[in-house]
Amino acid sequence: MTPEQFLELARVLPEPLLLVSGEGQLLATNQPVADMLGLHRKELRGKMLIELVTESANDIVKYLQACSSSRAMVIGSLTLRKNDGQTLICRSQGAVIQPWSCKSSALILLRLENRTLASSNFVLLNEKLDELAKEVQRRKQAEEALKKANQELEIRVEERTTALQETLNELQLTQTQLIQAEKMSSLGQMVAGIAHEINNPVSFIYGNLHHAYKYTQDLLKLVQIYQQFCPNSSPEIQQQIEEIDLNFLIQDTTKLFQSMKVGAERIQEIIKSLRNFSRLDEAELKQVNIHEGIDSTLMILEHRLQGSHEYPEIKVIKEYSQLPDVNCYPGQLNQVFINILANAIDALEVLAKNGKSSTVDSQTTDNGKLPKNNPQIQIKTEVMDENWIAVTIADNGLGINEQVRSKLFDPFFTTKDVGKGTGLGLYISYQIIVEKHNGQLSCFSVPGKGAEFVIRIPINMMSAKFP
């Protein structure tokens, strides 16, 4: 809008109107403005707005900047200096008008109103402009919404189908996990129950061994004293001494009680390992010794590590570092240990079986040569830094090729025969380490050279940022 066009519009309106530049220079005014100030219109042309008001230059600049950035009216307050020296407080409404040239600076329309007057005409014009702008905006939004709806409609069926399939897969996985969790819970309850039932009589036996040994020693001492003071006993007593071989009995009794003590202590160790493995009372976070969990798991699997007519003995090599107690879910970590160790034993049994039959699984080796038949599992623990520890479990079995290794932690993936594996052991282990403990579970393997699983977990889960 040019100043001339503004004046043509302003003539028909009774409100005081000014057209100013973005810098505050008066480009045009109408007669009501001149009347308010007591000046002629010619005297106003070219003046700066700051010359006509009492507000500071900083306040005027901020107000004009606000008007320049809004097409809607910006309400303000201006105190005019009248020609007679008096001041007049006016409410101002300002908004930017689209410049007639893209290179022109912003043109600002200012409407002044004495607070004691009403100006329904300008208010009505402002409302009409606002309504028109809102209607244009509504139509634009409706067009965009229609376009977006058309785009969304094209992919909605595909997304819904995909979502339903994912939901079905999740339900299937959840169902299987619940079954697996129930099995582990039942196993833990059974193990804990057996340990409790065995512990009571073993504790009774172990507790009485000391007294039985002491009583026996007292009786033997009494026999020795009797022999010392009554060396010439009756023939019947001498015959009985020879028959029971009293000297051997005295010597062997100590060994016998020592053997029973070792046996009872061994049973107590097994009971302790069973309890440690089940850990039904430790579902919450707890500071635990990781080595105890590993040793308890090895105790559970000991029958599979021992040699038999089918498979050779599996040697377990422990390289334990001095670890701090770790804040973790101990029962779930034991589940991870037993899954990985059981898989290692399975791999070594496959190696032994293939070694006997002189055949090699094409999925596991590339060179057609079997590793040396000296099965072993190496367990190594180490402190990575002040926040992290690592547990490495490695076997010298057939190894895993890249195609199989890339799917190891996928749910329901297994290389075992039907009925021998669910494909959930390593998947659940991965969830326990990564999601429950904010750690990492990795597998490294070269076909023919065994497999290595590395568990990295934080000492304290609050400091689980991986180094």
Image: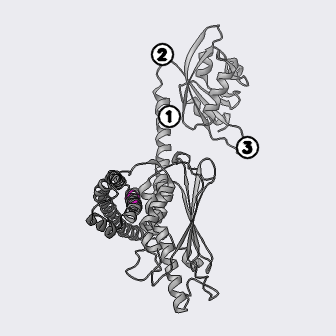
Sequence-wise first label, 1 or 3: 3
Count residues near mark 1 (Cα–Cα under 10 Å), then give few for <14, some for 14-19, many for 20+: some
Query: Decide: marks 1, 2 in contact (CB < 8 A)?
Result: no
In which image quadrant can residue 379 be found? Answer: bottom right
Q: Nearer the viewer, residue 235 or 428?
A: 235
Count residues near mark 2 (Cα–Cα under 10 Å), then give few for <14, some for 14-19, many for 20+: few
Distance in Å between CA atoms under marks 1 and 3: 26 Å
Who's the residue at 32% across and 68% down the image? Answer: 244
Who's the residue at 45% across and 63% down the image? Answer: 297
Across and down, in percent, residue 21 comes to 69, 31
Q: Secondary structure at mark 3?
A: loop
Task: Tell me the number on the disc at residue 116.
Answer: 2
Who's the residue at 51% across and 58% down the image? Answer: 434
Which residue corresponds to mark 3?
Answer: 103
Sequence-wise first label, 1 or 2: 2
Across and down, in percent, residue 201 comes to 28, 57
Across and down, in percent, residue 300 comes to 41, 66
Distance in Å between CA atoms under marks 1 and 2: 20 Å
Task: Tell me the number on the disc at residue 153.
Answer: none
